[in-house]
Amino acid sequence: MDCLFCKIINGEIPSFTIYEDEQVKVFLDINPNTNGHCLIVPKKHIVTVEDLEDSLATHILKVEKIIYQKLREKLHIDGLTICQNNDLGQDVKHYHVHLIPRYKDDNWKMQFNQESLKEPEEIFKQITNE
Ligand code: AMP
Ligand code: ZN
């Protein structure tokens, strides 16, 4: 399969792998937001969260905690932002979780266009039909 992350998982493309077990590989992002930005990637090729089995999700959560501890010990990070893109914003169509270390001085701001946002009450009605 012509998938970048499958190639990294099977060793065709090199990576800076910091953790690996039978279900996942964790390697440094090639274009990091902060020092230590890494990706948890399941070995099984799945695309979005909708394909993710509960048992694998539970395992990924365990690995998130392991990596958080490792990064705290080794890089002295101040926090960790965990995110995962699906469809829009997902450049690599092989499911992966971003672990982005936070540092007190990292000055990270997420910017969305908020000019035309509706009120939460209106959105609530749309979602719940109330
Ligand atoms: P997303 O936009 O959520 O699909 O994120 C894809 C991520 O993969 C980006 O942060 C890229 O920097 C990262 N990436 C792309 N190619 C590589 C690679 N060869 N090794 C490590 N990370 C990569
Ligand atoms: Zn893949």
Image: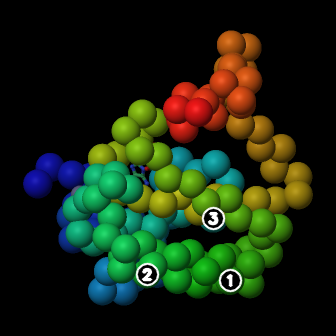
Pointer 1 residue Cβ closer than 8 Å to ligand 1:
no
Badge 2 crowding class, 10 Å Cα cut-off, few under 14, some 14 to 19, many 20 or more, is few
Q: Is residue 64 left or right of residue 57?
A: right
Q: Nearer the viewer, residue 75 or 82?
A: 82
> Which image quarter: residue 76?
bottom right
For badge 2, the amino acid type reads: His
> Which image quarter: residue 118?
top right
Query: How is the model colour-coded?
Result: rainbow
Sequence order check, earlier mark of 2 and 3? 3
Residues under labels 2 and 3: Cα distance? 21 Å
Label 1: which secondary element: helix
In this orientation, does residue 1 appear?
yes
Badge 1 crowding class, 10 Å Cα cut-off, few under 14, some 14 to 19, many 20 or more, is some
For badge 1, the amino acid type reads: Gln
Q: Nearer the viewer, residue 107 or 117?
A: 117
- Residue furthest to the front in view is 130
Badge 3 crowding class, 10 Å Cα cut-off, few under 14, some 14 to 19, many 20 or more, is some
Q: Is residue 101 left or right of residue 103?
A: left
Residue ID for mark 3: 36
Instruction: Quarter of the image for the C terminus: give it.
Output: top right
**Can you give x and y, in whole percent of width and height, for residue 51 in the image?**
28, 59
Residue ID for mark 2: 59
Label 2: which secondary element: helix
Q: Residue at x 71, y 37 (%)?
A: 110
Q: Residue at x 30, y 86 (%)?
A: 22
Residues under labels 2 and 1: Cα distance? 16 Å
Residue ID for mark 1: 69
Sequence order check, earlier mark of 2 and 1? 2
Q: Is residue 74 left or right of residue 42?
A: right
Residues under labels 3 and 1: Cα distance? 12 Å
Instruction: Quarter of the image for the N terminus: give it.
Output: bottom left
